[in-house]
Amino acid sequence: MLLELLAIPSVTGSAAETEMQHRLTAQLNHLGLHVDLWPLDLPALRAHPNFPGGEAPRDEAWGLVANTPGGGDGPTMILQGHVDVVPPGDPRQWNGAPFVPRVTGNVVHGRGACDMKAGLVANLAALAAIRASGARLRGRVAAHFVVSEEDGGLGAFATLQRGHTGDACIITEPTGGTLVTANAGALTFRIEVPGQATHASTRDAGVSAIDAYLPIHRALARLEDRRNVATDPLMAEYRTPYALSVGTLRAGDWASSVPDRLVAEGRLGVRLGEDPAQAVADFETCIAEACADDPWLTENPAIVTWPGGHFASGRLPAGHPLAALVRDAHSDAVGGPQVRERGAPYGSDLRLYAAADIPTLQFGPGDVRLAHSPREQVSIPEIVAVARTLVLAVLRTVGTK
């Protein structure tokens, strides 16, 4: 199943996202689950005041939720995963085609291997095992398979808006054998820096937007340092838990002209518990001060806007029993050392479920350090270990008759 899903190039916003949802629907129907597959009302979702943002253009998107049949007055456990993947980047850096999965020993390679089609397969394997066991559940198990996680969380947002909810949620993002109970947030920024064009041979008669941007870039580095001075204990293992990174720079339209405009786009890390509006204000103050200290930018200030995804931070409440439940399930189902708890420096759908008062954590196969890279891979034994843990955690949560 993992190899089949990896061969579907479900890049965020592409038609293959829809193909993934329909392929998973067939699998969920095969398991005898009650399936809700629906087209998302994109205009209505984008108009919602709590819309989480997005970056990839799209004409359609589909939601997919499946529930175990029957059940009674017991709780509902959600197993959640996203179907979209990021683009593969430079194909020359891959050892093989990104969407032609390769198996070496017990390791599977390919775009989406750990982020997070291995997690989807672990969810499906757990559901299949529970169904095959014939266990009569007192509660229900719900599978939430969502699109658009990579660019904001449209799919999870739409799923919750449709009324699909539960008493607890495990997201099978890659966690490298740990429990992730908190996520930092991330906001996408755009900085437009003006210059003054002229012929390159007389560049002193103009102002290069590239040169004008440099003091802003230095100010951003100082801002990142300030925002990472004191961190939550869950984030203590990270050198820079709240990274501020410029991802793209675009300037100029002719080699022999001085560029009159530079656009820088990147992501601003949001601290655990921080209001995203405060992070925005912190960033905009930094840019305004950098402009005020520069003669050209004082008269021609940079413009800051906030396109793309808006990831607030999120966390499982301290001491919530869900963490101990998954930790004990892993020990009993798999053995080995007890899994430790930590936070993650990236945004995820966790914050949307937490905001909906659904206790949520992440526990899934793979190492996030390999995600979004040409070295992306996952080991089959790790997928199996996660699936076994999920089975036990689910049965202990929903109960049996």
Image (cartoon, rainbow, N blue to C red):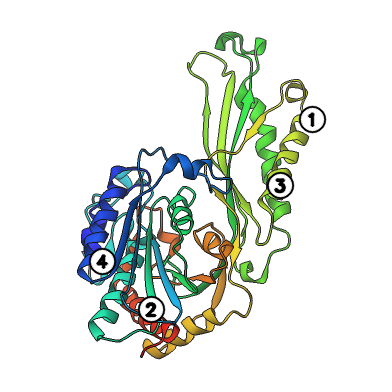
Which numbered disc flags the more N-terminal residue, 3 or 4? 4
CB contact under 8 Å: marks 3 and 4: no
Which numbered disc flags the more N-terminal residue, 4 or 2? 4
Report which quarter residue 208 is drawn in. Answer: top right
Foreground label between 4 and 2: 4
Q: Where is residue 140 in the image (x, y as percent from the top left)?
A: 38, 77
Seen in the image, is 190 located left or right of residue 28? Answer: right
Kind of residue sitting beneath label 2: Leu
> Which one is in front, 52 or 191?
52
CA gap, disc 1 to disc 3? Answer: 16 Å
Q: Is mark 2 on a helix, strand or loop?
A: helix
CA gap, disc 2 to disc 1? Answer: 55 Å
CA gap, disc 4 to disc 1? Answer: 58 Å
List the residue tagged with mark 2: 390
Circle 2 packing at 10 Å, graded few (<14), some (14-19), many (20+), is many
Q: Residue at x 36, y 38 (%)?
A: 59
Seen in the image, is 135 located left or right of residue 396? Answer: left
Circle 1 packing at 10 Å, graded few (<14), some (14-19), many (20+), is some
Foreground label between 3 and 4: 4
CB contact under 8 Å: marks 4 and 1: no
Q: Residue at x 42, y 82 (%)?
A: 398
Which numbered disc flags the more N-terminal residue, 4 or 1? 4
Kind of residue sitting beneath label 3: Leu
> Which one is in front, 318 or 40?
40
CB contact under 8 Å: marks 3 and 2: no
The quarter of the image holding the N terminus is: bottom left
Q: Residue at x 35, y 81 (%)?
A: 391
Looking at the rendered structure, which numbered label has been put on residue 223? 3
Looking at the rendered structure, which numbered label has been put on residue 292? 1
CB contact under 8 Å: marks 4 and 2: no
List the residue tagged with mark 4: 28
